[in-house]
């Protein structure tokens, strides 16, 4: 079913809030990764508001949906959405990357916050998600397992071992969303180590795969719904995004992969976001 204007507006509002939160959090920490979460804000907000059923009332349900953030360095946006859904307080966001905080620079598994797995070491996420999806099916659950990955993480060989297994076991309850922004820590992905056409690769591995504009909320929603309806194999959504989306001087710049905006840059960025 398509989204109503009200639902689209709610997602746009959430994505805007995520961008503002991410910039403030990384600025306050004086370190972190602003670019990725700005680029992922639109598809992550669509996922959290319309598909991923985590909220305070489902938090401890064994059969709720699960999410693994493979590109763990982008966790500022993840934390902002946990706050948006009421899993953590908004005040806690500003403890990001501080000593003793639950919100470290990469996600740490925490059942009380709904963080399903610790990530940061690229390459593990799809293996974990595949195991969770197989386990959920064996337990008779009807939940969905979402795995978030990236073009950079797709350079890891283990991703493709997991892709083989997930297709072999026909895990229709598993969806991977790849943040494909053509940027990684050292520069332009196509120049560093080109992963080429990920849709074709996932298809060749036996998955149902789709390319979408990761900033088109309706297209992302449709892809997630299609993934839900494909039950005989896992689905891959290759979300084409712009790193730093929403802040002109951060867009498409690998230099903003992992650098905090200073106070002046924060002011400029927030003014642009409005
Ligand atoms: C196994 C492993 N190797 C290296 C790193 C260091 N690292 C952190 S982020 C990153 C780049 C990942 O690319 P991508 O997720 O596409 O970056 P983004 O789009 O967020 O800029 C690397 C190599 C890591 N976290 N894990």
Image (tube, rainbow, N blue to C red):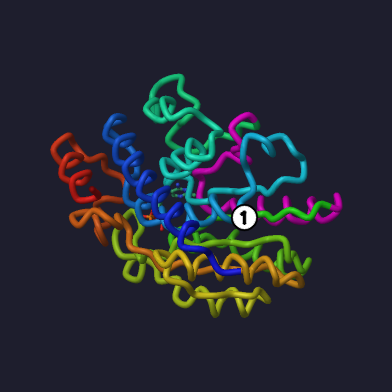
Given residues 272 and 71, the one toward you in this image is: 272
Q: Is residue 60 left or right of residue 180?
A: right
Please report the residue visible at 64 percent of the width from the left and 48 percent of the height from the top.
53
Q: Quadrant of the rendered structure where residue 130 is?
A: bottom right
Q: Is residue 40 above or below residue 267?
A: below
Given residues 256 and 194, the one toward you in this image is: 256
Q: What secondary structure is found at the residue carrying circle 1?
A: strand
Ligand 1 within 8 Å of the CB at mark 1: no
Q: Residue lying farthest left?
A: 264
Please report the residue visible at 17 percent of the width from the left and 34 percent of the height from the top.
263
**What quarter of the picture does the N terminus occupy?**
bottom right
The x and y percentages for residue 235 are: 64, 69
Image: magenta residue range: 112-140
The x and y percentages for residue 164 are: 68, 68
Given residues 98 and 77, the one toward you in this image is: 77
The x and y percentages for residue 129 are: 66, 53
Q: Is residue 265 above or below residue 215?
A: above
Q: Is residue 209 left or right of residue 24?
A: right
Q: Which residue is mark 1?
A: 146
Q: Is residue 195 above or below residue 102?
A: below
Q: Is residue 17 left or right of residue 264?
A: right
Q: Could you classify mark 1 by the number of other residues whose Cα lies within 10 Å: few (under 14), some (14-19), or many (20 or more)? A: many
Please report the residue visible at 34 percent of the width from the left and 44 percent of the height from the top.
33
Given residues 225 and 187, the one toward you in this image is: 225
The x and y percentages for residue 105 are: 42, 35
Q: Is residue 44 above or below residue 268?
A: below
């Amino acid at each position: 079913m398509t989204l109503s204007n009200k639902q689209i507006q709610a997602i746009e509002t959430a994505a805007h809030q995520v961008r503002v939160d991410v910039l403030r959090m990384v600025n306050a920490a004086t370190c972190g990764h602003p670019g990725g979460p700005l680029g992922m804000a639109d598809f992550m907000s669509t996922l959290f508001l319309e598909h991923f059923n985590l909220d305070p009332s489902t938090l401890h349900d064994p059969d709720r949906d699960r999410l693994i953030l493979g590109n763990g360095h982008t966790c500022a946006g993840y934390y902002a959405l946990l706050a948006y859904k009421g899993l953590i307080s908004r005040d806690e966001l500003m403890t990001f990357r501080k000593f003793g905080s639950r919100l470290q620079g990469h996600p740490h598994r925490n059942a009380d916050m709904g963080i399903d797995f610790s990530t940061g070491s690229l390459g593990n996420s799809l293996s974990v998600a595949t195991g969770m999806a197989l386990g959920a099916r064996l337990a008779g659950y009807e939940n969905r397992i979402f795995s978030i990955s990236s073009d950079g993480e797709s350079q890891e060989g283990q991703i493709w071992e997991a892709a083989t297994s997930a297709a072999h076991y026909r895990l229709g309850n598993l969806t991977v969303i790849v943040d494909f922004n053509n940027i990684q820590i050292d520069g332009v992905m196509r120049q560093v180590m080109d992963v080429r056409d990920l849709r074709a690769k996932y298809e060749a591995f036996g998955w149902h795969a789709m390319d979408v504009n990761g900033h088109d909320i309706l297209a992302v929603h449709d892809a997630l719904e299609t993934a839900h309806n494909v039950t005989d194999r896992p689905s891959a959504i290759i979300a084409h995004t712009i790193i730093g989306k929403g802040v002109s001087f951060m867009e498409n710049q690998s230099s903003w992969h992992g650098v905090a905006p200073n106070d002046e840059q924060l002011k400029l960025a927030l003014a642009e976001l409005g």
